[in-house]
Image (cartoon, rainbow, N blue to C red):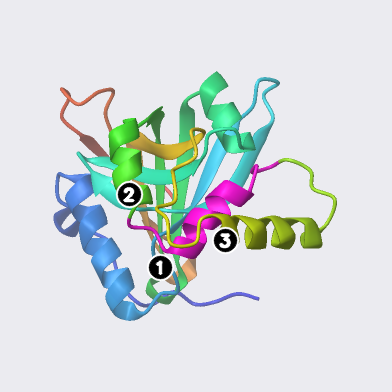
Amino acid sequence: MRRLYTRSILSEETAGSNPLELFQLWFSEAKEEGEQEPNAMSLATVDQSGQPSVRTVLLKGLIREEFQFFTNYDSDKGKDIAENPRVALNFFWPKLERQIRIEGQATRISKEESKAYFQVRPRESQIGALTSNQSSVVPSREFLEEKFASLTKEWEGKEIPMPENWGGYSVFPTKIEFWQGRVGRLHDRIQFERKDKTETWVRARLSP
């Protein structure tokens, strides 16, 4: 079950001084390499009792130097973020033998910005957002399919409204770690850290 990592190296010179620029470079290379859903990222949250949860969501852009994703605000992750906005993200690209870990704070984006994105989503995804009370218990798969079909018929030929409890989050990063697999498990780990946007990123190499 072990794999020998020989694909690349990560030096201080190639890491540079701006982790967001390095993220964009690695993300572009993941797309070019054909990684399956390179924008898939694990999102970790913590609930009111201190119980962590993690799930995969899709990055929809690095907007204003923040990582943006969309969801139902009444979902488990939405409730967690309302209680504790500190979150963690993780990208893993096995073909490139790379991983990026991000810590930061999530905030809701404006309703106008959420609506602008909702309007360009595929129609099936718009209907899906109306259908799903995300994270709530449902009686069966048939219940969801019947509701989806009913809403599809109801909104046929009409503009589908964005649900009031749906929208985007932006994650302001305070720590970003780049991981490059290496031989002998002596992986390259370079971390960038700051407290706020006014601070310069501080770079450090971590022991694997």
Q: Is residue 117 visible?
A: yes
Dot placed on the residue nearer the N-terminal end, 3 or 2: 2
Mark closer to the chain start, 1 or 2:
2
Residue 130 shown in magenta: yes
Q: Identify the residue position indicated by label 3 in the image.
A: 152
The residue lying toward the viewer, choosing from 84 and 194, is: 84
Marks 3/2: CA distance?
20 Å
Q: How many marks do you count on the picture? A: 3
Lateral position of residue 85 relative to residue 197, left or right = right
Q: Which residue is mark 2?
A: 117
Q: Nearer the viewer, mark 1 or mark 2?
A: 2
**Amino acid on which the number 3 mark rests in the picture:** Thr
Quadrant location of residue 31? bottom left
Question: Is the N terminus in the top left, top right, bottom left or bottom right quadrant?
Answer: bottom right
Q: Which residue is mark 1?
A: 182
Residue 165 percent location from the top left of the image: 52, 33
Is residue 173 at least partly visible in the picture? no
Hey, what amino acid is under mark 2? Answer: Tyr
Which residue is located at x 48 percent, y 33 percent? 164
| Local crowd size for mark 3, using a 10 Å CA cut-off: few (<14), some (14–19), many (≥20) | many
Task: Give the class, few, some or many, for how many residues have Cα within 10 Å of label 1's Cα (few <14, many ≥20).
Answer: some
Tell me the residue at 44%/51% (across/down).
Answer: 160
Helix, strand or loop at mark 3: helix
Crowd class of label 2 (few under 14; some 14 to 19; many from 20; radius 10 Å): some
Task: Indicate which label's residue lies in the foreground, 3 or 1.
Answer: 3
